[in-house]
Each structure stands twice: as structure tokens, then as C-alpha cells.
Image (tube, rainbow, N blue to C red):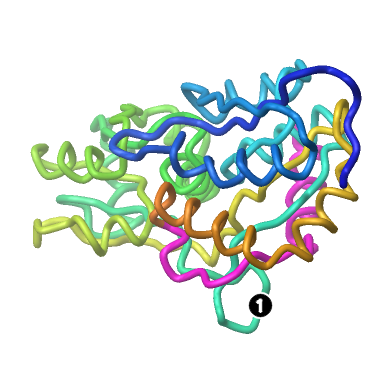
Amino acid sequence: MAQTDNTDTLVVATYAYPGLDRENAVAPIQAWLAQETQKPVSIRVASSPTELASWAEQNIIDIAVPNLTAYLKIRQQNMGAHFIAVPKNYRPHVIKSQYQGSIIAKGIGSFNELNRQLNKGNSVTVFAVFPDSTTGALIGLSKLRHSLSESQFKKLQLVYAGSHEQVIEQLSNHEFGIGIVAASAYRRVNQDSRITELWRSSNVPFGPITCIPKRLSCEALKQALARNISANQQILTGLKNGWPEFEHTDSLSFHEHKVYSDLLREQLTTR
């Protein structure tokens, strides 16, 4: 049994997303943690990945299920935060997936054309999901920042639509503009032939199940879960119900691929 301190109720936390039952998705983690620690465990659902990271910083949660953005924030705030596991698929690399970001456009056929529109002084709307979405904001905005001059980037009118589906719908309703979405959402949702994909990122690592060490023996918990095949599968099934990007995963990996430390180092350098 992985030991904890004597504080009563432990907390498993994640963040909300429209149309997805994230509380139910992490319930198998709650059940496993309660069995492993012999303590009551509650579930909290933050309004955003940023709020989830702030809960971790305040040490009011014990296990977090973040997106990549929130995981990096948690690690920046607490280098002792512990990687537990991450869904992986049957392909060779631990974190390789179809989880990619796309920049899509309507009425703009290339980055060169986007440059020309901005140089003419035209306002270009960029629809994104929400500020701390990984594939629905940060990755695409980073690409735009690197592809445009600072003055051009400042001319973009950023609108947060609230979901990948809403990004595509709002872009479809405009004469021209840019959208930032998960590549899988673009493939699944888009029915408008006037919307095209300008750019697709390389594979993006998932946010892992993360342990906050204040009240838990994180390494012992990680080892216990790695040995518990039944809990592994129940947890993965729950996560797949709450995160469409986990669709093609088939197991949990307990190996923290170096891409996470590389991304964390990059984030710390640019702070």
C-alpha cells in the first residue's frame, strides 16, 4: 500500500470541457486511489487547465489529470510534481499519437497570403478554443508568432470560441479568417469545403496523470499502478471516454519520455 499522511480526504482533479463528462472519466482513478490508500477520495473539476494548475500550486489536490499546457505549468511551479502515467498507442514511440494541432483558414490560401492581407492593413480574425488549450491555442499561436513579424501578429484579432467544434463553425460563418484546432477535430467536424488546412504540427504529447507529493508517496503509487493491470485498463477506459484524443491508445505508459523534460526546459527558458 502506498502511504499518505493523515489528512482525511484526497482529491483527484481535472478540467472541464464542453460536452464531455470529465468527472466520470476520472472516476476509475478515484476508485483506484481510494483502494490503494484506504482513504476517501473526492473529485474536483476545474473550469480550465489554468485553474487546475493553480490548485496544484496551492496543494489542494493530490492527483491531477491535466492537458500538456497545465502539466508544464504544474512542473514549473513544483519540480517535485511526479509523472505517473500517460495513455499510449501501439505505435513504436511512447508518446507518438495522432494528437496534432492544425491552423485552418477560410479565404486565405497560404501564409504568404496571410502576410499580404496583414500588410494591407486588413484585420484578420483568428478563432481559437481557449487560452490554455494546447492544440486549440498555444501550438497554433506559436506557429503564427514565428511565421509573422511582431507588428503583423499584433494585427490579428483573437477570438476564443470555447471548443474545437465552435472554432470551425464560427470560421465557416465568416467570409475569411484563421482557426486553431486539433487536427483530429478538423478531420472529424469540418464539412465546409472552403475551409482548408494551412499547417499541421508534429505529434503533441498528452498531458500525463500527475501526482502532487504533499500527501502522497508518488513513486510508490506509480509502481503500484504499474503492477495493477486491472486498474490500468479501467483507468484508460475512463480517460478515453473523456478525452477524444485518446481514441487510439491501448495502454498506459509509466515512462516519462524525454520530450516532457525538453518542453519543460524550453518553457523555463522563455519565462
Highlighted range, magenta: 245-271
Tag 1 residue:
93
| Percent position of residue 37, x then y | 80, 38
Q: Residue at x 59, y 70 (%)?
A: 251
Image position of 208 (left or right of 246): right
Q: Is residue 126 visible in this depiction of the protein?
A: no
Q: Residue at x 60, y 30 (%)?
A: 13
- Residue positioned most to the bottom: 92
Q: Residue at x 43, y 50 (%)?
A: 243
Image position of 57 (left or right of 223): left
Element assignment for label 1: loop
Q: 271 or 236, which is in the foreground?
A: 236
Amino acid at the residue labelled 1: His
Q: 82 or 221, which is in the foreground?
A: 221
Q: 50 or 171, which is in the foreground?
A: 50
**In the depicted structure, whether residue 248 falls above or below residue 6:** below
In which quarter of the view is residue 36 placed?
top right
Structural crowding at the residue carrying mark 1, measured as other residues with C-alpha within 10 Å and reported as few (<14), some (14–19) or many (≥20):
few
Would residue 268 be counted in the magenta stretch?
yes
